[in-house]
Image (cartoon, grey):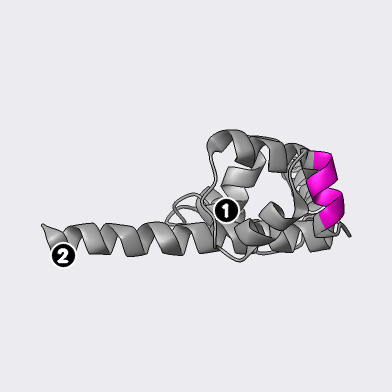
Amino acid sequence: MVHKAKSDQKAAEAFVKIVGDKIRVLRTEKGLSQEKLGELAELNSNYIGQIERGEKSLSVFTLKKIADGLSMSLEELFRLIDPADQTDALGEIIGLLSRRPVQEHAKALKVVKAVLEWNDSVK
């Protein structure tokens, strides 16, 4: 039982690090400093830094504030942090997009829409 608890703790710490890394990537892609994100999210910039380094766990409420500061929905942020199962085509698309800069998502959407419109026109 002790082994499982240690394993769970390590998994939780790894997830906190993944969340922090993704928040850092999204923040820098949007050209925001930790101070500016802190201001937008109504959080202390030092706390933002601790989250990004995986030093602090955060509540869903705090994650929502960060998502708002990044001009994203909580759902979008969750999808980017933990992409869907990639065993199907949709999951693979989500996984691919989650590893790309946020600015490329709109371009990818235009391409997908164009392909679907073309596909509908040749039926």
Q: Quadrant of residue 60?
A: top right
> Is 15 one of the magenta-colored residues?
no
Name the residue at 57% across, 53% down.
Answer: 81
Residue 30 rendering spot, x and y as whole percentages: 85, 56
Q: Which mark is residue 3?
A: 2
Q: Quadrant of the N terminus?
A: bottom left
Q: Residues within 10 Å of mark 2 (few under 14, many from 20)?
A: few
Observer-nearest of 119 and 41: 41
Per the image, the residue denoted by label 1 is 81
Residue 64 rendering spot, x and y as whole percentages: 65, 36
Residue 102 rendering spot, x and y as whole percentages: 77, 55
Kind of residue sitting beneath label 2:
His
On screen, residue 33 above or below 38: below
122 sits to left or right of 92: right
Q: Which residues are magenta?
A: 35-40
Observer-nearest of 58 and 68: 58
Q: Quadrant of the C terminus?
A: top right
Q: Residues within 10 Å of mark 1 (few under 14, many from 20)?
A: some
On screen, residue 103 above or below 122: below
Secondary structure state at the residue bearing disc 2: helix
Name the residue at 76% across, 53% down.
Answer: 45
Q: CA distance from mark 1 to mark 2?
A: 27 Å
State which mark lies toward you, 1 or 2: 2
24 sits to left or right of 36: left
Observer-nearest of 118 and 57: 57
Kind of residue sitting beneath label 1:
Ile
Which secondary structure is most common in the magenta stretch?
Answer: helix
Residue 85 rendering spot, x and y as whole percentages: 44, 52
> First in sequence: mark 1 or mark 2?
2
